[in-house]
Image: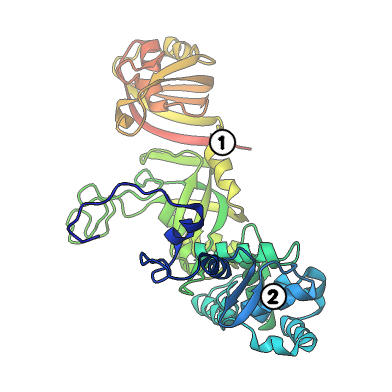
Amino acid sequence: MALDEPEAGPVEIDEEDEWQLYASAGYATIEPSFEDESDEEENTEEAWFDGDDFDVEANSLNWDAPPCPAPLGIAHVIKLGVCDHCLSRIAGTRISETTSGSEIRSQAYERDPELSSKALQDLCPLCENLFEDVGNITDRVFESLHGTQFSTMQFGIHLPKDLMQEEDRIRTKFGAPGSNPLKGSIVEAIHDNIREQGRNVDFVKERPDVMVLVDGLTLRVDVDVRPVFLYGRYRKLSREIPQTRWPCRACRGRAEGCEACEGSGLQYIDSVQDLIGEPVKEALQADDTSFHGMGREDIDVRCLGSGRPFVLEVKKPRKRIHSVPELVKLVNNNAETKVEVDSLEWCAKSRVNEVKQSRSEKSYTIRFRVEQLGAEEEVIEAIQGLSGQIIEQETPKRVSHRRAAKVRKRKLVSIDDVRVEGDEVQVTMRCEAGTYVKELVHSDEGRTNPSIQEAIGSDCEVIWLDVEEIHAE
């Protein structure tokens, strides 16, 4: 057909000629054949048979060969070009445990001296010679971890999808039953190489000191030094510091060129997190810290008694072993007159959830000024009458920008002590976790009900608030 001619309609194709649709260029032809029809059929069958013998580079492979550890199966995978490492892992568990891949290959060559010349390729179709780079990978890992203390390690490796599929196809068909997959075998080879170097490392599946991920295509090594965790209780003695870092309102923590925070990026230079975390970070040569407290107190609230439970997460520490009493001393020297801790202890990451999810009752002492104070006995009686009541609190206005708008019901467990001094009142009370104590006093324009302000019938202004005890244990 000429190029400018319209296409012809569909033509029915005989079953015998259907193979021509899938033939490579040069095999199918539109020229008429001058050969005998019987000869054409014979030639077609010879070129397009459905058998399993396949000739590649003049070597005949039997794709119906039995799987390993049968000698014919081993001979077949050798012809495919598998390396000694892969030959050992797919030849059969009993064989590979006592015999190396090179020995299995030598034995196959003894059975068939011509086998050594029949391998199809130098690049192993199962691993693409990745096992040859195990030593290189190990060197890169320990270069990345230079100067870092660790005793446990977990390895992972990422392999190209097409390599995994091809490896699985060949191993499933020709490998011995139960033969080891590529990914696990490479990881185990890396483990063995590290042991051969005399490194004192345990390989674990849970809570490793370091996690290593290897890219099997580029040999890139990513090392993740896992954090360590310290549990303790802190007392906040200052009414001028927040619990955690507070980014500067002007520059939002960007710091550079900000006059409001003088380039610190912080609204408050000190925080409980940094007063405790910075000396620990320096001692363990870590990158940073995160602070996980059992709730928090306002900046102007002290936390006394046995202190507030917390977990300090120390990120990417280069040192994981340190005297805990020495760390306590470093913290207290750094945070003198502002924050103090009595003890610290190493803990697991799971302790973070325990601390964050705790719903412990708390005891408070609060002092407030009353605009028009009535008779002392009546005031004391009215306040004590709230003991044991359920308080309904709408989300306070002061936290409405970061807390969901809803009504919370909390129990005022007990009121232990009420003191009246002039126009000021001081109350010690025990409350359910999550009670807004300041709002319990001044009512937050009626958002808290009942309240002390409602009970005594006069406006109240909070002077100060202390957390006396957190009943966590």
Pointer 1 or 2: first along the chain:
2
Q: Position of residue 50 (x, y in %)?
A: 61, 63
Camera-side residue of 212 and 23: 23
**Closer to viewer: mark 1 or mark 2:** 2
Three-letter code for the amino acid on which mark 1 is drawn: Ser
Q: Position of residue 18 (x, y in %)?
A: 47, 56
Residue at mark 2: 76
Q: Secondary structure at mark 2?
A: helix
Residue at 76%, 86% in the rendered image: 112
Do the residues bearing badges 1 and 2 touch, measured as CB atoms within 8 Å?
no
Q: Position of residue 140 (x, y in %)?
A: 51, 79
Assess disc 2: are there few (<14), some (14-19) or many (≥20) residues with their C-alpha within 10 Å of its C-alpha: many
Residue at mark 1: 358
Q: Is residue 443 visible?
A: yes
Assess disc 1: are there few (<14), some (14-19) or many (≥20) residues with their C-alpha within 10 Å of its C-alpha: few
Q: Give the image quarter of residue 388.
A: top right
